[in-house]
Image (cartoon, helix red, strand yellow):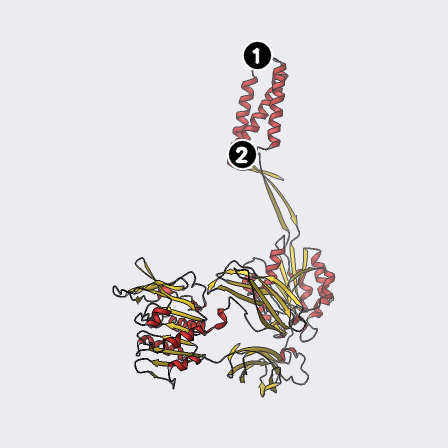
Amino acid sequence: MVPQIDADSSVAISISILVASLMAFILYRRTTPRLPRNYCLLLGCLRWVSVLIIMLLVTSPEITIVRSGNRKPVVSVLIDESRSMQYPDSSKIRLLTSHALDSALRELSSKVDLRLYSFSDDLRQISLEDISSIKPAGSRTDLAGALKSLIATSAIKPSVVVVISDGANNYGDDPSYYASHLSIPVYCIATIGTKPTPDIALESVEADEIAYAGSRIKVWLDISGTADTDIPTRVTISDSVGIVYSGQVVVPSHGAKIRMPIDLEVGDMGIHGFRVRIDPFEGENVLVNNESSFSVKVIKGKVKVCLIAAYPSWDFAFARRALKQNPSMEVSTYLTRTRLALDDALGRLSDALVSLDVLVIFKGAKLAQEYDAIQQYLNRGGALLFISGEADQRLFADFAPFVLNTQRQGRPRLYAPVVTSLGQNHDVMRVGMESQRFSWSRLPPLPVPGFIAGSRKQALVLLEGRSNGDRVDLLTVMRIGAGRIAAFSCFDLWKWDIAPKGFGLDVSAYDELLTNLISWLNEREETRPLVASTSRLVYMQGEPIDISARLSDDLKPVAGARLDVVVRRQATGETILASAMTDKGNGNYSMRIDQLPSGEYSAMVRARTASGKEIAQSVRFDVDRRGLEDSNFDGEPAVLEQLAAATGGRVLSDKEVGDLTSVISPGTIVVRSSKAITLKLNFATFALLAILFGIEWLIRKRKLLV
């Protein structure tokens, strides 16, 4: 134990001692009446101590007491207990029961502070005796997650980490990148075979999760083989009724992959589940990776959009091109001057409204004859989109979300687009999400006619324009009856298609914005106040399930509400989980569920409106029998090599386990601790001062000095 005093504290202590000594000496060098020397010395010491305490309280010097000692370094051993450790046979886990590993760990424990953990779905501490009884059953391998949990739960940072794994990392962050920032060497013991196990595997299934009734979808199967020769086999796809596809495929050899396309008819509306199976070859050891599932949500047919204009224009032409290239939309066009449809035999517009989903109305379109029919169309749940804001027609004046100035004053002014706070998280405004360089400020300003005087109270403004301090609403949405309406106050929107490409951005703001608007206008279920969904329809074991919900009141998002989720197993109705969702802001809520076993599930999301009414929506999802651990069961030595190389460690084979003690030599850890001591005014110091001054006063009084 060594006291340490810095320069400032040394000066403060010296001054305090000097002042206390001077006061004691001056006060008791001579007294009247004169006192014996022993009394003067006693009174001087009492005054010296009192003044010294007061000076130390005033100057607050700090004395640091440093203690040092030695301790054993901490070595943490992480043992992979995921399911891939038992594939294709028990050869990987034989290491855990081997005498070599047991001896190496016991010898290491005599030299270091050895701490043992198993990891897969979570991290748990074990003893030496527990290692031989580990049964790999975890649903995923998350090396980075195991390291994070180890650091978070360790009171003392380990000096060395040893990882025993096959390296089949299939979840979480990059372990090499994370470990490289820890300044801890990681040594890996690889439980990996020397040659691939003969096998054929269905690596992945890709298919659209949403399709249109009566349509066909493309399903892509990624199939791999590690056998010595190509293997012909059969692929079947079945649903709840029976086999819907059967075909032959030749699985390549030596780890090669093949991508197999299949056209599949999805049937009527609803959620359809499919099971894909590859017939195994004779003697194949691992069969679980020969199957996989996927689901398709079948909705009604393509969105039927009709573009209505008086005559072709640039805005009309760009909108028509953007929507026609979208395979989910069926586009027809109608010119009001000639009463002609350009693309198909649309017939009378009033009669065709029954089959149309969205009407896009451009500048100058004269629809006085169809006014009543369009009003009824909106009441039934139809949708209107106004482009190139125009007020010379009754339809725009009555149904557009804008307030109009009847006296048209001034020429159109240019306004630059700015996303509003309501628009930032709205589905319509999700434009250029994959381009980090895109921003609305890079789009050119557009002209707005002078008759736009603002928006109606019930309208939501998603995009506004700014020009020299002035503001105007550019894009608004609104509901009338059961229908939805969106409108632009600006025109020449086609320039937003060209401008980003001039900046070298691979994004078409115009195409994306227009497509988002049409999709949003057509989503009838979104008119419900509560909409819940899962990120996928089918999950593999080990994948987290993300449930999201959006709560709105007359199209306005509702934040700060309480949403509860109850997850049940479909077959038995058993409640698996009940929890509240997390408020993500702007009416969006989310919840993550982890580690569900295979099966079919339903999640009931409940919320309470401002009026006190309870609303609910149920969503369905499946967890497949196959999991993350049922692929790549031979392991990945490259992952362990990168992890060791990034941290300054080393990879040992299972035959080099006996060298573990000699390889790991962290040395002795010198532990230093320090504690700063500062004299503070508290009850103890106050009481001590009172006692010192009290004793001095009593002696002085008794000797007639007071």
Amino acid type shown at disc 2 = Ser
Quarter residue 21 falls in: top right
Camera-side residue of 228 and 604:
604
The residue furthest left is 410
Quarter residue 282 falls in: bottom right
Nearest to N terminus: mark 1 or mark 2: 1
Question: Is residue 633 in view?
Answer: no
Camera-side residue of 243 and 272:
272
Camera-side residue of 99 and 305:
305
Q: Where is residue 679 in the image (x, y as percent from the top left)?
A: 57, 34
Whether label 1 touches label 2, CB < 8 Å: no
Q: What residue is disc 1 on?
A: 32
Which residue sits at x=72%, y=64%?
131
Above or below: residue 104 compared with residue 71: below
Above or below: residue 32 compared with residue 282: above
- Helix or strand or loop: what does disc 1 sit on? loop
Q: Residue 60 has which mark?
A: 2
Which residue sits at x=68%, y=65%?
657
- Name the quarter where the N terminus is drawn: top right
Camera-side residue of 51 and 667:
51
Q: How crowded is mark 2: few (under 14 residues within 10 Å), some or many (20 or more)?
A: some
Q: Residues within 10 Å of mark 1 (few under 14, many from 20)?
A: few
- Helix or strand or loop: what does disc 2 sit on? loop
